[in-house]
Image (cartoon, rainbow, N blue to C red):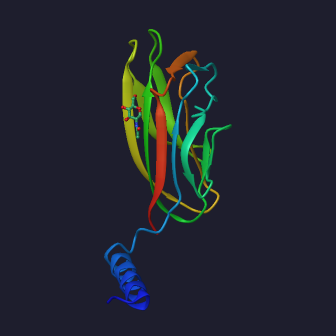
């Protein structure tokens, strides 16, 4: 007959074994946000894309009201984004690290033209990353979950 103690011991040991197999299963700062609203117009060159539906926000670094991710801790972060144009316009965009240009993006001039961007950035706690407009011509980003952005801590 298997005693409760034995079952408990077994569970504890299986748990420990799994934890040593997957030492990185701890929850790191991670966000994934989607543009839920049907369209965002980037009227000025300063406009930031506000992915308003944060589906994952571990560590609370992403602010869906501003579109800005603030690093909760130091490290190398990986970012990905998809920007789709809406109507027949191109979308010139860029990933910013604080107030500096970091990498460039361009969704081609067509209805539903999209570009995926990927980036790695070394951040200090409090550094800010966001996707913003790169043109002074007004351009429309397609929402309805066609454009999105995500980021997570990759390593220390
Ligand atoms: C981001 O949006 C595109 C559609 O434009 C979709 O194909 C992709 O799966 C989305 N990304 C994620 C991580 O869901």
Seen from the viewer's position, the closer of residues 115 and 104 is 115
Seen from the viewer's position, the closer of residues 24 and 79 is 24
Query: Residue pushed farthest top?
Result: 88
Instruction: Please tell me which residue is depicted at 58% across the width and 15% down the height of the picture.
Output: 138
Instruction: Using residue 40 as the reference point, say whether residue 121 is left or right of it.
Output: left
Percent x, y of residue 77: 46, 56
Instruction: Using residue 2 as the reference point, say whether residue 132 is left or right of it.
Output: right
Rendered view: 67 above or below 152: above
Percent x, y of residue 63: 65, 44
Query: Residue pushed farthest right?
Result: 65
Rendered view: 81 above or below 23: above
Rendered view: 84 above or below 58: above
Rendered view: 55 above or below 143: below
How many numbered circles are shown? 0
- Quadrant housing the N terminus: bottom left
Instruction: Please tell me which residue is depicted at 61% across the width and 32% down the height of the picture.
Output: 48
Instruction: Please tell me which residue is depicted at 57% across the width and 41% down the height of the picture.
Output: 54
């Amino acid at each position: 007959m298997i005693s409760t103690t034995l079952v408990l011991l077994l569970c504890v040991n299986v748990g420990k074994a799994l934890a040593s197999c997957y030492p990185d299963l701890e929850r790191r700062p991670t966000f994934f946000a989607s543009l839920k609203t049907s369209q965002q117009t980037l009227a000025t060159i300063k406009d930031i894309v506000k992915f308003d539906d944060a589906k994952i926000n571990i560590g609370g670094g992403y602010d869906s009201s501003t579109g800005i991710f603030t690093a909760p801790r130091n490290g190398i972060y990986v970012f990905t984004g998809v920007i789709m144009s809406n109507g027949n316009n191109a979308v010139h965009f860029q990933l910013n690290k604080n107030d500096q240009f970091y990498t460039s993006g361009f969704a081609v001039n067509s209805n539903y033209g999209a570009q995926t961007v990927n980036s790695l950035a070394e951040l200090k706690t409090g550094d800010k990353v966001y996707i913003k407009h790169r043109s002074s011509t007004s351009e429309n980003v397609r929402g309805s979950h066609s454009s999105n952005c995500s980021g997570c801590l990759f390593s220390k």
